[in-house]
Image (cartoon, rainbow, N blue to C red):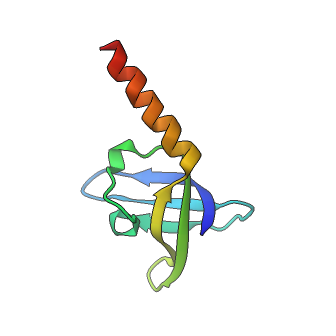
Amino acid sequence: MTKGSITKVVTSFGSTWGRITPLGESSQVFFNLESFAEPANFEDLKEGQEVEFDQEPDRANGTRAVRLVMSAVAASSAVSGQAEALSKS
């Protein structure tokens, strides 16, 4: 799997898509809801989040991310942040 970070997230006017920049590269990879290995909520995605993914050619966008998952470090910090927020309420 390739590691990278989310560089753009679009969630307006019925569009839900984004771009990822693989580590050490300047090119970007397209992703949308179908790219995720497990169901995801686009509103929870943030630019700069670390992700892991495979790539495949895409006629419309050049390269597309598939089997996209949040990196273990990013996912564990998100879970601990949610737990902290719940404990304060």
Image coordinates of residue 40 in percent, x first then y, are: 33, 54
> For this rendering, which residue is in front, 80 or 45?
80
Residue visible at 62% across and 67% down in the picture:
2
- In the displayed structure, 32 sits above or below 89; it is below
Number of marks: 0
- The image quadrant that residue 25 belongs to is bottom right
> For this rendering, which residue is in front, 84 or 51?
84
> For this rendering, which residue is in front, 3 or 29?
3
> For this rendering, which residue is in front, 60 or 2?
2
Image coordinates of residue 44 in percent, x first then y, are: 37, 43
Image coordinates of residue 79 in percent, x first then y, are: 43, 36
In this rendering, position of residue 42 left or right of residue 22: left
In this rendering, position of residue 35 left or right of residue 75: left
Residue visible at 35% across and 50% down in the picture:
42
- In the displayed structure, 10 sits above or below 86; it is below
- In the displayed structure, 80 sits above or below 3; it is above
Image coordinates of residue 78 in percent, x first then y, are: 46, 37
Task: Identify the image quadrant of the N terminus.
Answer: bottom right
Q: Is residue 48 visible?
A: no
Residue visible at 59% across and 66% down in the picture:
28
Residue visible at 33% across and 58% down in the picture:
16
Q: Is residue 62 visible?
A: yes
Task: Identify the image quadrant of the C terminus.
Answer: top left
